[in-house]
Amino acid sequence: MRVIFLLILFLGMSGCRRRDPLVAKVGALAVSKSEFHRKLSEVAQSYQNYVITPNGRRQFLDILIREKMILAAAQASEVRKSPQYRAQLAQLKAEEAERVREGSEYLLTRFWLEDLRQKGALKAGEDEARDYYRKHPAEVSVRHILIAAPNEAAEIFQRARGGASFAFLAKTKSLDAETAAAGGKMPPAIYGEIIPEMEDVVFHMRVGEISGPIKSKFGYHILKKESEKTVRFEAAEERILRLLEKQKLDKYLQSIQEKFPVEVIDEQFK
């Protein structure tokens, strides 16, 4: 912070009246004070300390001037008209437009959800959370193996039931890359944090039991229950509140679904 403060003293005091005063010009191009500070923030802290000295300040400006000279020469050249440059520039613009689109959609969604929260449509209180906890106080640890075809899933299930290492089967056979590397181990879960097709099975299994294959929209799951314990309400409260908010959001989406009909076009996804 001291370095930035000193830089402001060195470079900013004489130009307070201008919105973005200039440090130097190279032909039609300019080096503004804001650009100077932005470029400086990208270099190592040790060099920033050097730039607060008169020699360092001018040396860093010389670097920026050289960059502007190269850019000015490139802009004046025939390269701007080359097919290769134009093609890559068009691709860059398309990628940037896509990033802006995705960013705007993310922002719009975030603010829409926040608006629903402020209106109380998604709000879940402590009483609701405690009621949920009274019904579902347990947390389970489970391993799973995800297989695409039912025949292969049945075969892997028999191998697991026959004593083969469940973790090894998960590492070598499971399609769920996120958990396969850990031998199929899923994060500890309370009721509501596991996909519905597996949930009731998992919470009714005995510790050490292997079950399956269970069909879901992802494929066929073979499960092994490793542990079950009761968690304190205080430790689970935030997770329960998130689950209740999700349930309320799902219910709200169902209520407006008629306004936004869904049609799956591609046959392979039907």
Image (cartoon, rainbow, N blue to C red):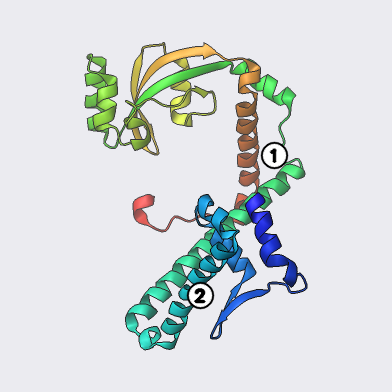
- The earlier-in-sequence mark between 2 and 1 is 2
Q: Is residue 1 visible?
A: no
User: CA separation, marks 2 and 1?
Assistant: 55 Å
* Rendering quarter of residue 89: bottom left
Looking at the image, residue 173 lies above or below residue 25: above
Total tally of numbered discs in the picture: 2
Q: Residue at left 38%, top 57%?
A: 266
Residue 187: assigned label: none
- Horizontal and vertical percent for residue 34? 63, 67
* Rendering quarter of residue 8: bottom right
Near mark 1 (Cα within 10 A), the count class, few <14, some 14-19 or many ≥20, is many
Q: Residue at left 50%, top 62%?
A: 99
Front position in the image: 236 or 254: 236
- Horizontal and vertical percent for residue 11? 67, 66
Query: Of the residues shown, which amino acid type is indicated by label 1?
Result: Leu
Residue 65: assigned label: 2
Q: Secondary structure at mark 1?
A: loop
Instruction: Name the side, left or right, on which 8 lies relative to 76.
Output: right
Looking at the image, residue 105 lies above or below residue 145: below
Residue wearing tag 1: 122
Select label 2 or label 1 by which is in front: 2
Q: Residue at left 60%, top 50%?
A: 257
Query: Of the residues shown, which amino acid type is indicated by label 2?
Result: Ile
Near mark 2 (Cα within 10 A), the count class, few <14, some 14-19 or many ≥20, is some
Front position in the image: 62 or 114: 62
- Horizontal and vertical percent for residue 207? 41, 11
Instruction: Name the side, left or right, on which 246 lies relative to 161.
Output: right
